Image (spheres, rainbow, N blue to C red):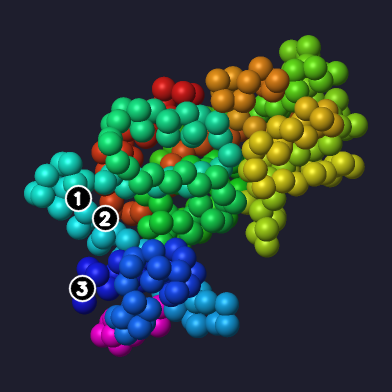
């Protein structure tokens, strides 16, 4: 097995096509195909499923890719240390629920290291995708929350994927609403106060149960529900429709502007927000700096 074979596999997985990977790597398609076939035969693993539209990663291929990425990251660190710092390209990836403090912390890490070159990734995703990313080593760490309602199910998933949860802080539920919302001047609000307004939540795909929901109180029946995939859309709907979402209350006016405000929600709930990492692993200096940056923003 050679590092170059691992690089081919990772690039094909990223592109979803051997042809596109060939173009980006400036290597002939037959060479990549033969290299991957030799690797699969040597390791006894079926990495890709071939389709008419390209290739997709198999279930066992996802696990293999996780280890391949880890090997390549370590190889890059070695080259950076012994070939000269000028050749080192830092790599760091985070998968998280839709938290503004997670974005602020990401910005802080980039500013702190101020590298001439870097390859960083921030993924705001569905809850099950965060767990899969960290389990398959696509991300060094993930950010999500536990509550009394989802803790048992989420912790069972973490154990099954050999992941661990480390709490960062506990928050009481708040709602995000627009600054000119009819309830904006309230010191706190109840679910009854919010009955006539659209409830905005993040769509969780085929895992759309309250165990994976980003919003506390998701088990309550609501007459008006809107699900979205990204934070910008959710905030636009909050301003355009007087909608609301349930959250931790931590908001960044630097990122989101003054148009969205946070109001305490009068319910007996809590959110423990923390990071998930692979068991028996140590965070890189970028991961450590990221966690420290989060603590500064909460």
Above or below — where is 1 with respect to 275? below
> Magenta segment range?
37-47
Q: Earlier in the sequence, mark 1 or mark 3?
A: 3
Q: Please, what is the dominant secondary structure of the magenta stretch?
A: helix
Q: Which residue is mark 1?
A: 77
Q: Residue at x 42, y 34 (%)?
A: 106
Residue 124 in the image, given as x and y percentages of width and height: 55, 45
- Residue 184 position (above or below residue 284): above
Residue, x 60% and y 30% (percent of image)?
Answer: 248
Q: Is residue 2 rendered to the left or right of residue 216?
A: left
Asked whether 245 or 65 is in front, the reply is: 65
> Which secondary structure lies at badge 2?
helix
Count how many numbered circles sit on residues in the image. Answer: 3
Q: Point out residue 187 in the picture as x, y percentages from the top left corner.
A: 74, 13
**Residue occupying image coordinates x 45% and y 69%:** 20
Q: Is residue 19 left or right of residue 214?
A: left
Residue plotted at (45% across, 74% down)? 19
């Amino acid at each position: 097995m050679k590092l170059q074979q691992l690089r081919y596999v990772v690039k094909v997985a990223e592109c979803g096509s051997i042809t596109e990977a060939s173009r980006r790597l400036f290597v002939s398609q037959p060479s990549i195909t033969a290299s991957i076939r030799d690797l699969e035969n040597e390791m006894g693993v079926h990495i890709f499923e071939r389709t008419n539209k390209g290739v997709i990663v198999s279930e066992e291929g996802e696990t293999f890719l996780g280890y391949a990425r880890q090997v390549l990251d370590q190889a890059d660190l070695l080259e950076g240390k012994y070939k000269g710092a000028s050749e080192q390209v830092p790599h760091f990836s985070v998968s998280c629920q839709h938290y503004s403090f997670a974005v602020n912390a990401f910005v802080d890490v980039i500013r702190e290291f101020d590298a001439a070159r870097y390859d960083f990734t921030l993924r705001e995703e569905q809850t099950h995708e965060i767990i899969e990313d960290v389990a398959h080593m696509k991300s060094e760490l993930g950010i999500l929350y536990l509550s009394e309602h989802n803790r048992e199910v989420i912790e069972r998933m973490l154990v099954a994927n050999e992941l661990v949860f480390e709490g960062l802080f506990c928050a009481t539920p708040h709602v995000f609403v627009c600054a000119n919302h009819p309830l904006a001047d309230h010191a706190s609000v109840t679910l009854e106060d919010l009955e006539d307004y659209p409830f905005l939540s993040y769509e969780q795909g085929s895992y759309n149960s309250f165990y994976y929901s980003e919003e506390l109180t998701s088990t309550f029946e609501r007459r008006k529900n809107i699900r979205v995939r990204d934070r910008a859309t959710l905030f636009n709907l909050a301003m355009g429709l007087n909608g609301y979402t349930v959250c931790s209350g931590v908001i960044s006016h630097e990122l989101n502007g003054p148009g969205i405000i946070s109001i305490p929600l009068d319910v007996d709930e809590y959110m423990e927000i923390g990071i998930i990492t692979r068991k028996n692993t140590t965070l890189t200096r970028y991961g450590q700096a990221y966690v420290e940056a989060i603590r500064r923003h909460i």
